[in-house]
Image (cartoon, grey):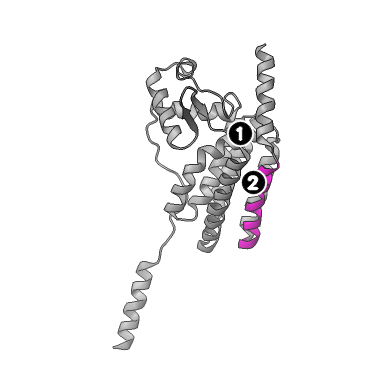
Amino acid sequence: MSKTRNDTSNEGKRRLRVVPQPVGWEKLRPRTLVDQAMEAIIAGASRGLILPGDRIVETEIAQALGISRVPVREALRLLESQGLVVSEPFKGIRLMPVTRERLDQALEARVALETTAARRALALGVGTDALSARLRELELMAARGDAYGCAAADTEFHRTLCRMSGNGVLCALWEQLARQITIIVGLSTLRKPMQEIVAEHRDLLRVFATGEPAALERALEEHIRLQNEAIDFEHLVEQRRRGRARRRA
């Protein structure tokens, strides 16, 4: 009887074992004008066309994109819900500011989420194929000198790392930061060579391949926090704004 109970218990454990889903292709979904407007605004911010603190005029964006104001208005509403734009009385809608305090908070949250994801991915024995594919995309965008493409590929690399954890709640929390990450990385390319960004991700992939959790946590901490803290984003934005004003004059 005891043996039968043990066998049953073991059988239950086998059934309850969580098997991580492989990271691979995802089904495409139709992209609406709202989706495209959101992407265009993020791309503009990543390339420095719209700077943190800049006023975003609905009619100007709609005219530039060749669409009506309705999808632009909805896109801005969604971006506001994600904290990417702010609406202030008598000031209109503005792109989120990148202050030292805000950056520190975003980086702290990223470090916590991504180190947790990395530990879990290593424990599950997930391979590096998916990250290698994202790295190749990053290399391609950097070779093209595409600031937004580089920023989007950087974000996708870290999104893939989070998905490798198999933790859906963690991924959902990380997604709330995803577009902020894209803008910050895009702005960093105004000061940091894109090939340097690629080299940092090569190092992350190499450390992940070693399977050493402590080493990977240190590498993520340095990559996410220390590398970004080395850039004075407020000064960078102000310099860019002054340069833009001189060109217009």
Q: Is residue 189 visible?
A: no
Q: Amino acid at mark 2?
A: His
Q: Nearer the viewer, mark 2 or mark 1?
A: 1
Task: Give the residue at x 45% y 37%.
Answer: 82
Q: Residues within 10 Å of mark 1 (few under 14, many from 20)?
A: many
Q: Amino acid at mark 1?
A: Gly
Depth check: 150 or 71 in front?
A: 71
Q: Secondary structure at mark 2?
A: helix
> Percent x, y for residue 161?
53, 50
- Image quadrant where one finds the C terminus: top right
Secondary structure at badge 1 equals helix
| Quarter of the N terminus within the rendering | bottom left
Furthest toward the top, the residue is: 249
Q: Which residue is mark 2?
A: 201
Residue 167 in which image quadrant: bottom left
In the displayed structure, would residue 238 be above or below residue 247? below
The part of the chain drawn in magenta is: 211-230
The vertical placement of 17 against 164, above or below, is below
Is residue 87 at least partly visible in the picture? Answer: yes
Label 1, on which residue? 186
Q: Is residue 236 left or right of residue 20?
A: right
Image position, residue 211 (x, y; %): 61, 61
Coordinates of residue 163 in the picture (x, y in percent) = 48, 51
Q: Is residue 185 left or right of residue 86?
A: right
Quarter of the image holding residue 21?
A: bottom left
In the figure, 249 relative to 17: above or below?
above
Circle 2/circle 1 CB separation < 8 Å? no
